[in-house]
Image (cartoon, rainbow, N blue to C red):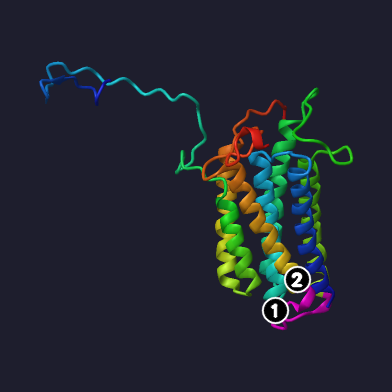
Amino acid sequence: MIESGFRRNNGRVSDRFAKPMRRQVPVAKRPFLPFDGVMVMILPFVIGLLAALLAMRGQRFGAILAWAALVIVLLAWLQYHASDTLNVSL
Amino acid sequence: MLIRLLNLLGLLGVSLALLVAFYYQFFQNELPCPICLLQRGCFVALGIGFALNLSAGPSRLHDAMILVSGLLGAGTALRQMLVHIGPGDAGYGSPLLGIHFYTWAFVAFAGAILYVAVLLFVAAREDRPARRTEGAGLLGRLALWLFVLVVGANLLSTLLECGFGACAENPTFYEWLGPKAA
């Protein structure tokens, strides 16, 4: 196991045995998402339910804010999932 | 009066589309893919505009929300159509009347965009005030409750299928029930 590029020497970290860190190569190219790895598929429906409840109660401002958040999350999730290369000439 | 009826029909149409998807999910055992779930999310966003028109009174802002949701949904459905458009591709899921659900979804979202044009046209003819506060009425309240229940059911079914993480690209079983339960 390589720990931050240094070997342990009798419990002390010595730079005598320092090895260059292995370069991290991405396994699969993922589209940019600021919270990549924390993908929660239910999030659009949680926000959607909140917006629907607020809309039902006539709380216009809150419902519009929740709707805007829903649209942003849907766009981000679409960018995350629409990763296949299309086999079409556009 | 006509505009309220149109918004009521719009909200019922959104709930109906989500219920048909539910029928295929639970009675035909066809689990929705992540992009399919996003299209459902776009239907929910669409419904919020109609719901606000019913509960808070018609407004151009609510119509714009329907328009944006319709465009986002149509784009999402079109993306899935293009994935499966190649020759020999069987598509995802079983077709309804010879057309796959994502294509139906595209038709529905395009229809919603046209529907907004009708709403604006009727609003201009009715020369209504900017907002009304007369409430949704009994039918409107029932439609709003149905919509909230359908959105809540979608939340629960997505939780069952995907748990608290990402969904499988091609799901074959419910994450929370295990492979044998599907």
Residue A34, located in which quarter of the rendered image?
top left
Q: Earlier in the sequence, mark 1 or mark 2?
A: 1
Q: Quadrant of residue B86?
A: top right
Specify the subunit that label 2 lies on.
B
Few, some or many C-alpha atoms within 10 Å of disc 2 (few <14, some 14-19, many ≥20)?
some
Q: Residue at x 64, y 69 (%)?
A: A55
The boundaries of the magenta stretch are B125-140
Residue B171 visible, this angle: no
Chain of the residue on which disc 1 is drawn: B
Question: Where does residue B9 sit, x and y in percent of width and height?
Answer: 82, 65
- Measure the alpha-carbon separation of dots 1 and 2: 24 Å
- Name the residue tied to disc 1: B130
Residue B142 is marked as: 2
Which residue type does callout 2 highlight? Answer: Leu
- Residue A76's x, y, as percent? 55, 45
* Residue B79, quarter of the rendered image: top right
